[in-house]
Image: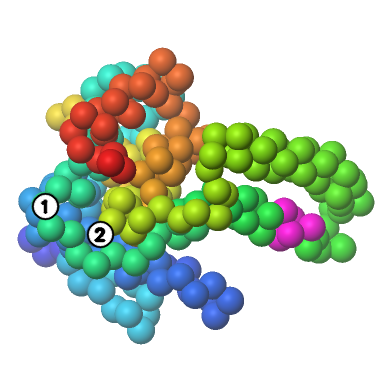
Amino acid sequence: LAGGNAVALKCYFNDPRDPRDRLAAEWDLLDFAWRAGIRNVPQPLVRDDDAHAALYGFVVGRRLTADELIEAHIEAAADFIVAINGGARLAFPLASEACLSLADHLAIVERRLKRLAALDPTAPRVDAARALIDGPLREAWKKAQADLERQARAAGMDPARRLDPAQCRLSPSDFGFHNALADPAGGVAFLDFEYAGMDDPAKLVVDFFCQPEVPVPARLRPWFRDRLVTRGVDRK
């Protein structure tokens, strides 16, 4: 800009077949965060709903790798979750693919398997892919699903029972160090909240550890979980 500040223009995916409003999800969380004094996220500047686009303050930083993650980075991630869940929260909708029951988790996997099975017949190696999906992958999923349902019932848990909405917490959903930048001062900024919303805090933790791009080392997992619990982002 003329004053020397840099901004980022983000254009959001939009398709009639996908009802998610990615612009609204990200903007609402960032606007809420900035009003709450949280500054390790991009500043929301202006949005254009018709154009499915928004301007944000430019965040200076570099990508982190899994090998360099330390306790301070995990602490920053946990503290960010605590911060966005502190005080009064807006009436956020559910996060993308929010899961409030075991049945919800199972349904998501089933939907994804169906999408995989709808292969383009002209795609390369489609026959081998179809054989994998309809054979070993489908059989492995059936076994996993049966095991999960059996374990749930053995623990006295109804797979269809849904979490009380009052126990949900605000979640970035696609949360992890693949969507983070280390700034020159040693802090961590967090980005990309297109799927944000209310969700089971247990799923928030699972999302954080299961993202494969910049995986959190196993030795640091208790650090994140315990900090969330001790600072109040649990589902009492």
The quadrant in which the N terminus is found is bottom left
Judge the density around disc 1: few (<14), some (14-19), many (≥20) Cα neighbours within 10 Å. Answer: few
Please tell me in which quadrant of the rendered image residue 229 appears. top left
Q: Is residue 93 above or below residue 164?
A: below
Residue carrying label 1:
87
Residue carrying label 2:
29
Q: CA distance from mark 2 to mark 1?
A: 14 Å
Q: Are marks 2 and 1 in contact (CB under 8 Å)?
A: no
Q: Residue at horizontal 45%, vertical 33%? A: 209
Q: Residue at horizontal 57%, vertical 49%? A: 159
| Residue numbers of the magenta segment | 113-117
Q: Residue at horizontal 55%, vertical 80%? A: 16
Q: Is residue 190 visible?
A: yes
Task: Give how far across and how far down residue 225 sits, in percent.
Answer: 33, 29
The kind of residue tagged 1 is: Gly
Name the one closer to the observer, 39 or 200.
200
Q: Give left or right: position of 47 versus 195.
A: left
Q: Secondary structure at mark 1?
A: loop
**What is the number of the mark on residue 229?**
none
Q: Is residue 116 magenta?
A: yes
